[in-house]
Amino acid sequence: MGKALYLCYWLTELIFSNNYNFRTMKIFKVLPLFMLTILFSNISGNAQNTARLQKAQLAPVAQVAVTDVASLLEEGAIMVDVRETSEVAALAYNVEGIVNIPLSELTERMSELPTDKKLIMACRSGNRSTRALNLLAQNGYTDLVNLSGGMKAWQNAGLAVTAANAPAAKSCSGAAAASCHKGGQSAKSCSGAAAKSCSGSKKTSCCSKKGADVKAVEPGSKN
């Protein structure tokens, strides 16, 4: 404050002085002080902005367990996945109404999110969603929770996901059927001396779960 007053005093002297030499001398005196004042103001402003950002980042973040998400969704909450679109395409939360806005695009697309609903921020492990939550909090969003553990915890809990390369279920019917047993083991053959009969009224199938015999449907019979 004192430096600012001192600068104002010398600027006044400079402006109202009629002596050219006096004004020239004052310029060389005032100019360094003026530059230092501007530099000090910039440093002070940057320090204040940094402090506000650190305070926002260190603020406690409300966490929600994956097992509690369903009840929040029933109450009207919206789940927001901040992973990249390629990650979501490969493995996605199977949640109705989920919104995908990557963290890298959140600043530009923030207006797509409502301010009057609870937002459940989610990602792969919980780190990016925490950063997204803090960014939203700095821009006026108040009802925010972070999905603890992200997709990792979601999968560990056995909750529904949508995978791009999910293996198709193997069929136990048709000539191309390869296996009827869990783990990909070969189905038992219906031929050979030790095989059970595949004819007669009690015709059995070798494509039964865990090797248990089931009665086969005779051609033309009703199910």
Image (cartoon, rainbow, N blue to C red):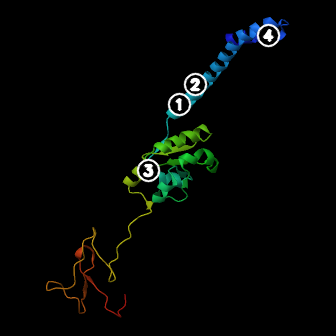
From the top left corner, tell me how far across and down residue 71 is, in percent: 49, 53
Label 3 residue SS: helix
Q: Which residue is label 2 attached to?
A: 47
Q: Nearer the viewer, residue 159 or 104?
A: 104
Q: Amino acid at mark 3?
A: Val
Q: Which residue is label 3 attached to?
A: 66
From the top left corner, tell me how far across and down residue 28 is, in percent: 71, 10
User: Which dot, 2 or 3, sits closer to the camera?
Assistant: 2
Q: Amino acid at mark 2?
A: Ala
Question: How would you rate the neighbour count of disc 3 (Cα within 10 Å): few for under 14, some for 14-19, many for 20 or more?
Answer: some
Instruction: State the quadrant of the C terminus.
Output: bottom left
Sooner in the amino-acid sequence: mark 2 or mark 3: 2
Q: Which residue is label 4 attached to?
A: 14
Residue 9, quarter of picture: top right
Q: Which residue is label 1 attached to?
A: 54
| Vertical arrangement, residue 4 with respect to residue 60, above or below | above
Question: How would you rate the neighbour count of disc 1 (Cα within 10 Å): few for under 14, some for 14-19, many for 20 or more?
Answer: few
Left/right placement of residue 36 relative to residue 190 reads right
Q: Nearer the viewer, residue 69 or 3?
A: 3
Residue 116 visible? The answer is no
Sooner in the amino-acid sequence: mark 4 or mark 1: 4
| Vertical arrangement, residue 107 with respect to residue 195, above or below | above
Q: Amino acid at mark 1?
A: Gln
User: Which dot, 3 or 4, sits closer to the camera?
Assistant: 4
Left/right placement of residue 42 relative to residue 191 reads right
Residue 161, quarter of picture: bottom left
Residue 181, quarter of picture: bottom left
Label 2 residue SS: helix
User: Which dot, 4 or 1, sits closer to the camera?
Assistant: 4
Q: Amino acid at mark 4?
A: Leu
Residue at (64% x, 20% y) in the render: 39
From the top left corner, tell me how far across and down residue 97 is, in percent: 55, 58
